[in-house]
Image (cartoon, grey):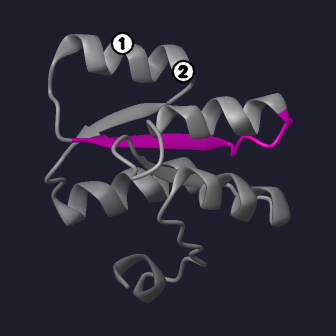
Amino acid sequence: MLLEASGYEVDLAATAADAIAVDASTPHDLMLLDLTLPDADGLSVIGGLAARGLLPRSVLALTGHADLATRQRCIAAGCDEVLVKPVPLRQLLQLIAERMA
């Protein structure tokens, strides 16, 4: 709701399979990717999209883990930023605006 209220068009996906299907049907500029999805590790979405040449211009990972290993794993997978939850809304909107510019 926050992103839509800020003028962004938003597609939602609750699972890794849904995220890959949604992204395959419509090109996206940015993806907010939670690492904890019910059907797979969120980073598997990046691999699935990359294999089909469908990666968004920017991927922001959301995680509850602030450790260095998680950050390194996200960056190695292709994430541009790793945000530790809870993410302050102002920070999230600013980061999205920077990536969309």
Query: Do the CB atoms of the residues marked 2 and 1 lie less than 8 Å apart?
Result: no
The image quarter containing residue 3 is: bottom left
Helix, strand or loop at disc 2? helix
Instruction: Determine the residue positioned at 26% across, 11% down.
Output: 69
Helix, strand or loop at disc 1? helix
Image height of 31 relative to 47, above or below: below
Q: Nearer the viewer, residue 96 or 53?
A: 53
Q: Which residue is mark 2?
A: 77
Image height of 33 relative to 8, above or below: above
Which amino acid is tagged 2?
Ala
> Within 10 Å of the Cα at label 2, are there few (<14), some (14-19), or many (20+) other Cα atoms?
some
Residue 71 counted in the magenta span: no
- The residue range painted magenta reads 52-63
Position in image of residue 58 (x %, y %): 59, 42
Q: From the viewer's perspective, tell me whether residue 2 is left or right of residue 8.
A: left
Is residue 89 visible in the rendered image? The answer is yes
Position in image of residue 96 (x %, y %): 45, 56
Q: From the viewer's perspective, tell me whether residue 13 is left or right of residue 75.
A: right
Instruction: Determine the residue positioned at 47% across, 41% down.
Output: 40
Q: Nearer the viewer, residue 18 or 70?
A: 18
Which amino acid is tagged 1?
Gln
Position in image of residue 78 (x %, y %): 57, 24
Work out which quarter of the rendered image holds the C terminus and state it.
bottom right
Q: From the viewer's perspective, tell me whether residue 79 is left or right of residue 27.
A: left
Q: Which residue is mark 1?
A: 72
Instruction: Determine the residue positioned at 54% across, 41% down.
Output: 59
